[in-house]
Image (cartoon, grey):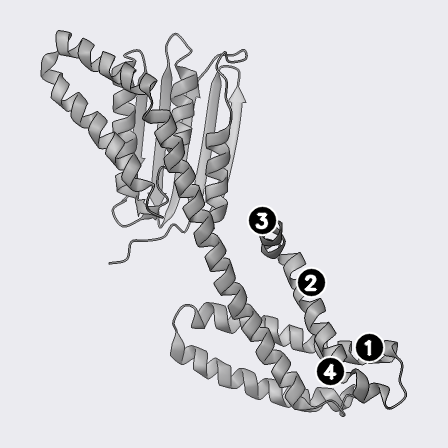
């Protein structure tokens, strides 16, 4: 895991790769330049003069040609820019090498370096993708385990059965809907954790079922919800809002008149989710491990979502705001 942490660090990764490449070049040209009577400091200086502009060209090529055009499958534009890039690079090197007294260096070696640089970038993309996929599987697996531990346990099922039994005596006509609600909620949580993304409208439907179940359990709970936007084609990682809603229900339940205000807006793939609930002004009697929130933060990072997550507590009110930009869309 330490190796992966180092690799995921942009500065350390590039430092290590550049040191390795620089060392390989040093070994390759040492005998050739040493033969002319120069010391190793002179050799290092000459290599640096030739290496630095190559890094600049490689970085430009990766960021402004490969990433926005090749990876976005704009092949025609990519090929045109590739030809322009290599032509410009060739003429630049023909001018630069004699200018800094590097004419003895073979152009083939520098071209090989550039090819290696682009190859390193492709390797980096593949490795990063594999790491990201592995992290997503681990996170989803942990989410599924967390759900199974929390929901499919004797206390939860016992409370659910007691509530259903009580309603079967007082309002038996509502019982089928309650059972169906509970069944849909459990099924969705189990199936959703097996996926990387779900439709946003499915996630919203789950939140509604989840809050309906808890308002059924606690008639004092006043849960107001507002949803604004078109959600059917937008995707989001599964059970994203669950830890936030769970915390709101948990801590508002300690008060005499629990209330929760949920507001979700979507505009042009940009999502704004806010949650506000009352809580005890003093320290809560309930223990909070913070695992749910930390899991959410980690999932935001793993899925590479540009986001902003804010918490705020004022006396007996707790609020949280989650903004996510450029959510993915479902593939038709």
Is the C-beta separation of discs 1 and 2 under 8 Å? no
The residues tagged by marks 1 and 4 sit, at their Cα atoms, a distance apart of 15 Å
Task: From the viewer's perspective, tell me whether residue 219 is left or right of residue 317.
Answer: left
Out of 157 and 305, give the one closest to the viewer: 157
Q: Secondary structure at mark 2?
A: helix
Instruction: Tell me where residue 33 sits by quadrant.
Output: bottom right
For the residues carrying marks 3 and 1, which lies nearer the camera in this image? 3
Which mark sits nearer the N-terminus, 1 or 4? 4
Which mark sits nearer the N-terminus, 3 or 2? 3
Task: From the viewer's perspective, tell me whether residue 12 is left or right of residue 154.
Answer: right
Residue that carries the numbered disc 2 in the rendered image:
15
For the residues carrying marks 3 and 2, which lies nearer the camera in this image? 3
Can residue 63 be spotted in the picture?
A: no
Residue 202 in the image: x percent, y percent? 26, 40
Out of 198 and 29, give the one closest to the viewer: 29
The residues tagged by marks 1 and 2 sit, at their Cα atoms, a distance apart of 18 Å
């Amino acid at each position: 895991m330490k190796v992966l942490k180092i690799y995921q660090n942009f500065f350390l990764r590039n430092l290590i790769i550049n040191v390795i490449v620089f060392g390989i070049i040093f070994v390759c040209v040492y005998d050739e330049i040493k033969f002319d009577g120069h010391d190793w400091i002179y050799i290092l200086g000459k290599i640096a003069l030739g290496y630095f502009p190559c890094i600049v060209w490689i970085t430009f090529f990766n960021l402004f040609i490969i990433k926005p055009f090749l990876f976005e499958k704009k092949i025609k534009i990519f090929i045109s820019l590739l030809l322009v890039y290599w032509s410009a690079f060739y003429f630049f090197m023909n001018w630069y090498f004699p200018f800094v007294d590097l004419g003895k260096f073979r152009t083939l070696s520098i071209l090989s370096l550039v090819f290696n640089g682009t190859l390193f970038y492709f390797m980096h993309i593949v490795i990063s993708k594999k790491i990201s996929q592995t992290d997503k599987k681990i996170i989803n697996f942990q989410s599924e385990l967390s759900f199974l531990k929390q929901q499919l346990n004797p206390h939860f099922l016992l409370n659910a059965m007691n509530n259903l039994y009580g309603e079967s005596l007082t309002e038996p006509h509502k019982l089928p809907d309650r059972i169906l609600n509970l069944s849909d909620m459990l099924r969705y949580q189990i199936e959703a954790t097996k996926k990387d993304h779900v439709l946003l409208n499915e996630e919203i439907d789950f939140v509604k079922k989840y809050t309906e179940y808890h308002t059924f359990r606690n008639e004092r709970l006043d849960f107001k919800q507002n949803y604004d936007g078109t959600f059917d084609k937008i995707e989001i990682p599964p059970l994203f809002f669950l830890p936030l809603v769970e915390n709101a229900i948990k801590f508002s339940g300690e008060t005499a008149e629990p209330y929760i205000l949920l507001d979700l807006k979507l505009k042009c793939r940009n999502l704004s989710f806010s949650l506000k609930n009352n809580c005890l002004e003093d320290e809560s009697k309930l223990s909070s491990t913070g695992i749910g929130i930390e899991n959410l933060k980690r999932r935001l990072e793993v899925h590479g979502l540009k986001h902003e997550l804010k918490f705020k507590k004022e006396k007996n009110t707790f609020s949280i705001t989650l903004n996510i930009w450029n959510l993915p869309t479902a593939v038709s």
